[in-house]
Image (cartoon, rainbow, N blue to C red):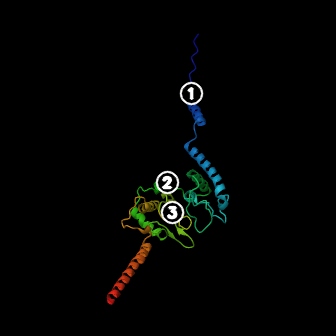
């Protein structure tokens, strides 16, 4: 008897088996592989917002409202962005000790991690200026001369021409910029805190802000030298003129009195 011939497989059977194996492998990978970077970042951001909301409820809600909508004691925080939070809390201005014409800089009570969490929560309430990166405010690629020109045009009226600060009306003042973190200077230009106008990128570009920060570091840095000698606090022509008026005129009066006394003595003799 003839042997029964073996059943021949369909030519596509091997392809089907391979696809099934790949599908099974992919399903197992999807089930057991770690979350993607985007998912991890989203989870981390959600946790930061949750922690920031807790901090906000304890330290900020009394004045700014439970949802950041503002009250009679504090403005709305919807849309101020993370940069405003990083500046205000990072310089110790917030939480404020008491209301007044201007909230001064003071010791920071939150850690940077807590500030980041607060900023994440406030940013979730509405889009606004974001915290700048070091590449935005760092010295690389900055034009110090251009920064000085921009500073004298836009900032010197209040902060003095080297950023030493100055008095304004009704108890307000422009604070000194000496020793201020470059990041906070950038954020102040972005957000316009308190009496300061804001300078968005449409007014002062990112490069312009970088140039201004580089200029301030050049005139107020630790290695800055004063080629003119006694700088009188860097307050400019007002203090220099006052010094010349008081001591210069005083010296002239003293010389005039001495000459008059010598002349009168000579006549008597």
Q: Which residue is mark 2?
A: 133
* Residue nearest the observer in this picture, 22 or 250: 250
In the image, residue 244 above or below residue 130: below
Q: Residues within 10 Å of mark 3 (few under 14, many from 20)?
A: some
Q: Which residue is mark 1?
A: 13
Residue drawn at x 48%, y 71% is 157
Name the image quarter holding the C terminus: bottom left
- Taking the image as shown, residue 47 lies to the left or right of residue 147, namely right
Q: Residues within 10 Å of mark 2 (few under 14, many from 20)?
A: few
In the image, residue 100 above or below residue 263: above
Cβ–Cβ under 8 Å for marks 2 and 1: no
* Residue nearest the observer in this picture, 228 or 110: 228
Query: Residue 59's quadrant in the figure?
Result: bottom right
- Counting from the top left corner in percent of width and height, residue 182 is at 48, 58
Query: Residue 257's quadrant in the figure?
Result: bottom left
**Residue pushed farthest front?**
269
- State the SS at label 2: loop
- Taking the image as shown, residue 264 lies to the left or right of residue 234, namely left
1 or 3: mark nearer the eye: 3
Dot placed on the residue nearer the N-terminal end, 2 or 3: 2
Cβ–Cβ under 8 Å for marks 1 and 3: no
- Taking the image as shown, residue 66 lies to the left or right of residue 144, namely right
In the image, residue 57 above or below residue 11: below
* Residue nearest the observer in this picture, 187 or 238: 238
Residue drawn at x 36%, y 82% is 258
- Counting from the top left corner in percent of width and height, residue 153 is at 45, 69
Q: Is residue 211 visible?
A: no
Query: Residue 98's quadrant in the figure?
Result: bottom right
Q: CA distance from mark 2 to mark 3?
A: 14 Å
- State the SS at label 3: helix
Residue drawn at x 46%, y 69% is 160
């Amino acid at each position: 008897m003839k042997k029964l011939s073996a059943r021949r497989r369909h030519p596509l059977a091997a392809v089907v088996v391979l696809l099934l194996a790949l599908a099974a492998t992919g399903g197992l990978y999807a089930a057991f592989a770690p979350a993607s970077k985007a998912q991890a970042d989203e989870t981390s951001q959600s946790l930061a917002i949750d922690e920031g909301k807790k901090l906000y409820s304890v330290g900020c809600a009394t004045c700014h409202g439970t949802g950041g909508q503002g009250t009679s004691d504090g403005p709305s925080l919807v849309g101020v962005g993370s940069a405003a939070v990083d500046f205000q809390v990072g310089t110790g201005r917030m939480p404020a000790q008491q209301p007044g014409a201007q909230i001064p800089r003071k010791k920071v009570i939150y850690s940077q991690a807590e500030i980041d969490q607060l900023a994440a929560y406030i940013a979730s309430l509405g889009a606004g200026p974001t915290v700048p990166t070091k590449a935005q405010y760092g010295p690389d690629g900055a034009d110090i001369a251009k920064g000085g020109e921009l500073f004298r045009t836009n900032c010197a009226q209040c902060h003095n021409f080297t950023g030493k600060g100055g008095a304004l009306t009704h108890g307000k003042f422009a604070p000194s910029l000496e020793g201020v973190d470059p990041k906070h200077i950038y954020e102040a230009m972005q957000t316009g805190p308190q009496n300061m106008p804001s300078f968005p990128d449409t007014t002062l570009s990112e490069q312009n802000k970088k140039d201004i920060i580089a200029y301030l570091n050049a005139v107020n840095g630790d290695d800055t030298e004063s080629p003119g000698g006694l700088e009188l606090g860097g307050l400019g022509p007002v203090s220099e003129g006052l010094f010349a008026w008081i001591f210069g005129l005083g010296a002239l009066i003293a010389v005039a009195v001495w000459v008059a006394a010598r002349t009168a003595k000579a006549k008597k003799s």
